[in-house]
Image: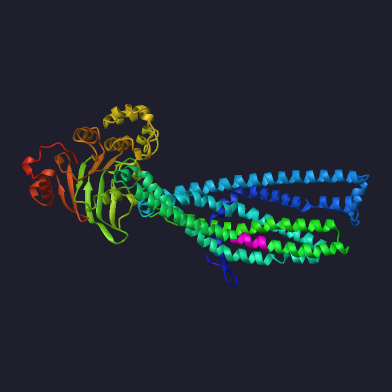
Amino acid sequence: MARWTMKTRRGRMDLGGVRAVGARFSKYIRPHRWKLLGAFGAAFGTIAMQVASPWPIKIIFDYVLTDKMRPSWITDALSAVSSGPTSVLAWVCGAILVVALLDAVFSYFRDVLLAQTGQRVVGKIRQDLFAHLQTLSPDVFENRKTGDLLMRLTGDIQMLRQMLVNAMITAGQAGMMITAMIVVMFWLNPVLAILGVSTVPLILWASWRISKKINKATKNQREKESEVASIAHDVLGAMSIVQAFNREALEQKRFSRQNRSSIRAGLKTTKLQSKLYRIVSVATAAAMCAILFVGVRSVLAGQMTAGDLLVFISYLRALNKPMRQVAKLTGQVAKATSCGQRVADVFAIAPSIEDREGAASLGAVRGAVSLDGVTFRYNDAVTALSDVSVSIEAGQRVAIVGHTGAGKSTLARLLLRFHDPAEGTVRIDGVDIRDATLESVRGNIGWVHQDTVLFGMSIAENMALGRPDADEETIRDVARRVRADDFIEALPDGYDTVLGQGGSQLSGGQRQRLALARALLREPAILLMDEPATGLDALTRSLVEEAWMAPANEATTLVICHRLRDMERFDRVVVLEHGCVVESGTHVELLAQRGKYAAMYTGAYGAGPADTATGRAAC
């Protein structure tokens, strides 16, 4: 979209950003257009009441106190309904109360309708943004700070509401108010009206000029606030590490430094806004002085009544409010535009992995897995896998071994379709997983990651993450299979115990058992495990191993290993090195070849083929 600008002598207001953000989020406004029209109608009623509010006081001055009111329909109406000054005063007091009451009613409906619309618009945008974030590949989040994304999901969207909802009504009401009062002012006294509106161009010019600076300052402020949120997120999520390494003072200093930077950025924005308000106030005061000087002389000369001057001054003072609103609104729109652009930037991130057109569900899956000539590069630069071809039959148990950086975890991520290969094909039951829906691919895989992730939900809910309809008995049965039932029952609320941040009240082994239970509860066709015994002692490791090595587990089981004992229990061992499959076969076959695998095994345990039946440590 073209970026149009309104230029001034020393600055310019960027309208392109406003138009782009408005166009991007206009679809969220359209369903609420009738409520906005209602709010606009209520705002029009408020304007009418504010235009009428000085006239009862004029009547008191010109009709009751001095009897200098010029003949008009107002004087005719007062003569018809009253019998004297006291009666007129009573009618005027009643009119003041009616005007105030109607103004309050109109204001109430305007504010309620705006609040309802604003909250629903914000809620829908936040809901859609959260849904969009969940469609993005994990590498998007690995390359971005969580605090920054949280800021865009919360504070930035809330600020965007100001532009999408409030700004329209506020600008419309302010514009109609200014127009109505200027028309009446010219009707009362054209000379004074010219003096009153002479400062309007100055105020508008200052608003356009400063708003661009506010936009830039707001972007910087939001970035600083995102940094603060990111630091707080990192430190609070790893408090045990912070305390263990005595980093409290250092982290406090880092947080304080970034916090001061955020405060300075916020102060800069506030100073710019205050500068704009200051210009409006001084300009309005100057107009007031000019009107008082000329107006009082006109009253003394008999050219206008004191009531006329009072109405005129009331309108000029009332004009100060919408003019301030316009000035304030300019700054708010600049800030909201900046925040809206940050939100739009996240929406603009296209999912790298999506269902192809015509993608079908895998249906009943046996669990056969094959990779044919698969090559994958991170960031189109670092080759993680190169021409990998592996064929695994349904129900087989396969160990994937290799040194750190060999490409083992990358292979798992391709199978889960977190990425697509640059070359080659990944298949399940002979079907290219790119031709199947993401839901059906991932729904047939149970994944146990070496970095166990638990959510702030109950233990039962964490276990049933991939199968939310599982009943209590099924959950308990799986917990018993992975030897987790005893420690769960020992917790204060058992399976209903709500876990804290990352399940920090549990040991590493307990968290890993819950992760394994979560995967087994899905009854997947393919069980994919990355270092499943991480954090387990030898006895627990042996017990837990039975859960996925027992005959009851009929899933095709792929296990990423570093420990190489008990490898004879796997149907096959696949050896990766520098992203390539260098060997594949049974444990005994690979030792007999005396190649890479045999060298790894001997280097780890100093054992030869004759020793392979001993030892109970799992991978």
Closer to the camera, 339 or 485? 339
Which of the 4 image quadrants contains residue 206?
Answer: bottom right
Residues drawn in magenta: 275-282
Q: Where 75 falls versus 517 (above or below)?
A: below
Closer to the camera, 394 or 490? 490
Q: Percent position (x, y) of residue 450?
A: 27, 43
Does residue 331 belong to the magenta stretch?
A: no
Q: Is residue 32 left or right of residue 107?
A: left
Residue 358 seen anywhere in this rendered image of the structure:
no
Residue drawn at x 32%, y 43% is: 243
Does residue 278 belong to the magenta stretch?
A: yes
Q: Where 416 falls versus 469 (above or below)?
A: below
Q: Main secondary structure of the magenta part?
A: helix
Tell which residue pokes out farthest to the bottom in this image.
9
Q: Percent position (x, y) of residue 434?
A: 34, 51
Q: How is the image coloured?
A: rainbow
Q: Percent position (x, y) of residue 423?
A: 28, 58
Residue 250 seen anywhere in this rendered image of the structure:
yes
Q: Where 192 falls versus 542 (above or below)?
A: below
Residue drawn at x 51%, y 62% is: 216
Q: Percent position (x, y) of residue 271?
A: 55, 59
Q: Is residue 139 left or right of residue 148?
A: left
Residue drawn at x 91%, y 46% is: 85
Q: Is residue 112 left or right of residue 442?
A: right
Numbered-mark total: 0
Q: Is residue 45 left or right of residue 240?
A: right
Which of the 4 image quadrants contains residue 105?
Answer: top right
Closer to the camera, 522 or 619? 619
Closer to the camera, 99 or 348? 99
